[in-house]
């Protein structure tokens, strides 16, 4: 049976350390770090994600300044709001909750964010620096995946890693981080042939496709390190991941659950990136 590695437990530990760092700043009479959050429209999922993020800030004593904008705002108004946060020395990181409502150009909005405050790592300058191995903000979910592998005591160097999913926010940057850690990486996607065969040879398997319980034990090598990034809402209202957890758990050496796996790590890495922006340590 696999050892289950809970992101929720890692998150508690890491957030406690950040809370102590912020407490020390308070005691020293320094400014408190602040995450600026922009929510456009009233998409319930986005509202709930934003709530989770501002609550997480609060839990460690970090400030969160939320700006809620109506769905029908113009691109110019959105850019002006981002500009205000760029110019505000009291705001260290900017989180523009995606997706934006129809009619607003996400890439144009992201380009407006000051790269030094781009704690989601979405600005082209950060993306470019990431692929040049220069200092930059790295997207939060991939950072969370790497932290979970670390907590599995996974020695990545020399291992074969398969990342299923090639999105710019998850699959592609995860693959890059694994490659930088000297794994031999294969990226798979919806047009990959013989997916099961490729996955079942991987020492490290990262499932990031958004298909409920897609990966059964047949996709998994005996003793593999398996991370489930997927978040899927299934009919009974419960969340599940991309792994068929019950069968994979019997074959893998380490596995992450959904919920309580990668999700809490993503928010934790957002807090960490905001602290780095505050400290200027990126
Ligand atoms: P996305 O942009 O929709 O990308 C999905 C990727 O999976 C695409 O590259 C797609 O291939 C590939 N794919 C889809 N079905 C496939 C299949 N049957 N076989 C092989 N590849 C397949 O999604 P995303 O943003 O990367 O997110 C992936 C999952 O992670 C979602 O469930 C999302 O909710 C979750 N997520 C979780 C967190 C977290 O904090 N835990 C954060 C972000 C995302 P093509 O490129 O060929 O279309």
Image: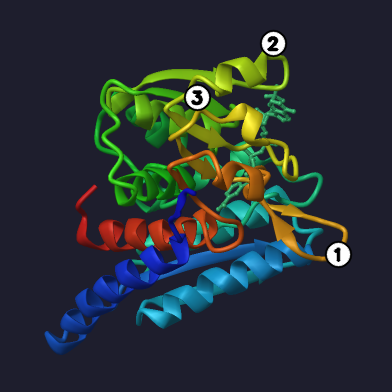
Q: Position of residue 264 (x, y in %)?
A: 49, 63
> Going from the N terminus, do you reach mark 1 or mark 2 first?
2
For marks 1 and 2, give the CA distance. Answer: 32 Å
**Residue at image location 63% in from the left, 35% down from the top:** 217
Q: Is residue 65 left or right of residue 153?
A: right
Q: Which residue is more in the foreground, 51 or 205?
A: 205
According to the picture, the residue beneath numbered tag 2 turns out to be 193
Q: Position of residue 9 (x, y in %)?
A: 40, 68
**Residue at image location 19% in from the left, 52% down from the top:** 281
Up-down relation of residue 154 to residue 21 (above or below):
above
Residue 90 visible in rendering: no
Q: Quadrant of residue 108?
A: top right
Local secondary structure at mark 3: strand
Q: Is residue 37 left or right of residue 236?
A: left
The local crowd at label 3, few if under 14, some if 14 to 19, many if 20 or more residues have their Cα within 10 Å, is: many
> Going from the N terminus, do you reach mark 3 or mark 2 first?
3
According to the picture, the residue beneath numbered tag 3 turns out to be 162
The local crowd at label 2, few if under 14, some if 14 to 19, many if 20 or more residues have their Cα within 10 Å, is: few
**Residue at image location 64% in from the left, 44% down from the top:** 247
Q: Which residue is more in the foreground, 262 or 223?
A: 223
Question: If the picture is divided into quarters, which one holds ligand 1?
Answer: top right
Q: Is residue 21 left or right of residue 194?
A: left
Up-down relation of residue 167 to residue 261 (above or below):
above
């Amino acid at each position: 049976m696999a050892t289950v590695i809970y992101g929720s437990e890692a998150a508690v530990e890491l957030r406690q350390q950040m809370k102590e760092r912020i407490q020390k700043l308070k005691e020293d009479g320094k400014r408190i770090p602040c995450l600026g959050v922009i929510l456009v429209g009233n998409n319930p999922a986005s509202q709930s994600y934003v709530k989770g993020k501002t609550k997480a800030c609060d839990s460690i004593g970090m400030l969160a300044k939320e700006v809620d904008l109506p769905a029908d705002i113009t691109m110019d108004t959105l850019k002006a709001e981002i500009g205000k946060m760029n110019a505000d020395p009291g705001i260290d990181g900017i989180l523009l909750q995606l997706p934006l409502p129809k009619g607003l150009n996400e890439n144009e909005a992201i380009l407006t964010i000051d790269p030094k405050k781009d704690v989601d790592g979405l600005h082209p300058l950060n993306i470019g620096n990431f692929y040049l191995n220069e200092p930059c903000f790295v997207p939060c979910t991939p950072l969370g995946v790497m932290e979970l592998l670390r907590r599995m005591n996974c020695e990545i160097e020399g291992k074969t890693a398969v990342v299923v999913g090639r999105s710019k926010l998850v699959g592609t940057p995860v693959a890059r981080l694994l490659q930088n850690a000297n794994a031999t990486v294969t990226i798979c996607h919806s047009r990959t042939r013989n997916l099961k065969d490729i996955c079942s040879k991987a020492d490290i398997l990262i499932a990031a496709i958004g298909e409920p319980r897609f990966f059964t034990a047949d996709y998994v090598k005996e003793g593999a390190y398996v991370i489930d990034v997927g978040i899927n809402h299934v009919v009974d209202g419960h969340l599940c991941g991309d792994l068929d957890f019950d069968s994979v758990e019997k074959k893998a050496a380490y596995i992450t659950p959904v919920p309580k796996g990668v999700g809490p790590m993503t928010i934790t890495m957002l807090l960490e990136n905001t602290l780095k922006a505050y400290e200027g340590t990126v």
